[in-house]
């Protein structure tokens, strides 16, 4: 049975934002729910079967609320909103726009884009050590850097320390040109990029010269005690058990740690066990240590990244079932 629902848009600019370039947002909603959507004046008409019309209407309501709060719609957040409606939890989307965790050097507000990201930022704010584990593109590193810059700007900490294990992912360090710093810089580039975005290149360089910011390979952490610092260990799936224990025991007074990684992308040689997988079990249920898990719904990169992650998960599931 075909039914129709009418929604009032109100302002023309909201209708333009809702429809998107070449009506791509509305076409996506039509495909996902099997409905037809037309605009007549300031009214939006949705037609189709009753359940599909109901869900499409809830999606559009949620998107209009995001627009009202100043959000710019993209394919990613439209798809995320659709997924949340299908799960019956789109009401929680309203809270996302309230949470500006950092302002970039260009004045852009950084906000969590998914419920998983919101929980992650909340965990970082409330715990001494936070583990962020999940696939590529979920914002684990970027949001951790944003939280570190926020803590530094508010003088909660005196230093930001970013580190990664310099583990080859198919290439060999020895074949790269230059001195040791030149060889490890490519491994630290994602951390530099995030800091440049938050602080600007000049401000970043100033803080590096003062010793307020340090970006270094994990091996440089050995033998140190890190007080009054916000410390981020990225790509932690490529640590050994010994390296992870060494890193975690660097924690000093008035410091905070965030450990990020993707346990499906381990590049350790000779089948060595990941220190991240090991410590997630060992440190489970300890006060002031939080574990946040991301999934493909939290991916904020190109839509194909979500599809690639799901395809690999299906492939691995079939492999384990054999």
Image (spheres, rainbow, N blue to C red):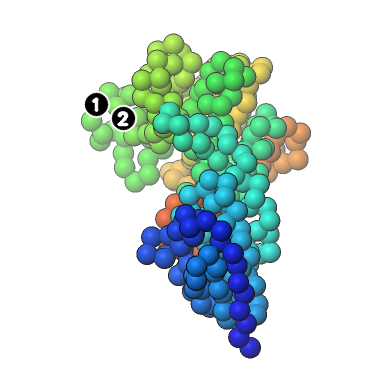
Q: Which mark is residue 213?
A: none
Name the element at disc 2: helix
Residue 244 or residue 16, whichever sits in front: 16
Residue identifier under label 1: 178
> Residue placed farthest to the left in the image?
177
Looking at marks 1 and 2 on the same chain, the residue that comes earlier in the sequence is marked by 1
Residue 277 or residue 88, whichever sits in front: 88
Tell me: residue 237, above or below residue 322.
above
Q: CA distance from mark 1 to mark 2?
A: 6 Å
Measuring 61% from the left and 79% from the top, which residue is drawn there?
4
> Residue placed farthest to the bottom in the image?
1
Picture quadrant of residue 177: top left
247 relative position to 104: left or right: right
Residue identifier under label 2: 183
Measuring 50% from the left and 67% from the top, which residue is drawn there?
41
Please provide percent x and percent y for residue 77: 52, 55
Mark 1: few, some, or many residues within 10 Å (few <14, many ≥20)? few
Work out whether residue 241 can be spotted: no
Looking at the rendered image, the quarter that the C terminus falls into is: bottom right
Please provide percent x and percent y for residue 273: 54, 44
Answer yes or no: do the residues labelled 1 and 2 have beta carbons within 8 Å?
Answer: yes
56 relative position to 201: left or right: right
Looking at the rendered image, the quarter that the N terminus falls into is: bottom right
Tell me: residue 127, above or below residue 221.
below
């Amino acid at each position: 049975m075909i039914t129709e629902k009418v929604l009032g848009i109100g302002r023309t600019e909201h209708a333009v934002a809702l429809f998107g370039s070449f009506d791509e947002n509305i076409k996506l909603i039509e495909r996902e729910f099997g409905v037809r959507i037309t605009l007549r004046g300031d009214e939006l008409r949705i037609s189709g079967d009753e359940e599909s019309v109901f869900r499409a209407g809830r999606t559009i309501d949620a998107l209009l609320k995001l627009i009202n709060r100043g959000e710019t719609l993209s394919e990613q957040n439209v798809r995320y909103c659709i997924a949340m409606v299908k799960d019956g939890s789109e009401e929680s989307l309203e809270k996302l726009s309230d949470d500006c965790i950092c302002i970039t050097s260009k004045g852009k507000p950084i906000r969590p884009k998914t419920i998983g990201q919101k929980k992650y930022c909340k965990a970082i704010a409330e715990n001494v050590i936070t583990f962020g584990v999940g696939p590529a593109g979920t914002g684990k590193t970027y949001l951790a850097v944003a939280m570190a810059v926020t803590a530094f700007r508010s003088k909660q900490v005196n230093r930001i320390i970013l580190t990664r294990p310099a583990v080859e992912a198919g290439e060999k360090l020895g074949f790269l040109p230059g001195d040791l710093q030149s060889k490890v810089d490519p491994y630290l580039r994602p951390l530099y990029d995030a800091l440049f975005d938050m602080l600007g290149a000049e401000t970043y360089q100033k803080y590096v010269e003062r010793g307020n910011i340090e970006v270094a390979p994990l091996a440089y952490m050995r033998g140190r005690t890190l007080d009054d610092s916000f410390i981020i260990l990225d790509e932690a799936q490529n640590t050994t058990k010994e390296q992870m224990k060494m890193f975690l025991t660097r924690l000093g007074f008035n410091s905070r740690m965030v450990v990020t990684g993707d346990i499906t992308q381990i590049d350790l040689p000779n089948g060595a066990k990941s220190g991240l997988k090991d410590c997630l079990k060992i440190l489970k249920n300890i006060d002031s240590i939080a574990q946040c898990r991301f999934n493909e719904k939290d991916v904020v990169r190109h839509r194909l990244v979500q599809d690639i992650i799901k395809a690999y998960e299906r492939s691995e599931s079939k492999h384990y079932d054999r």
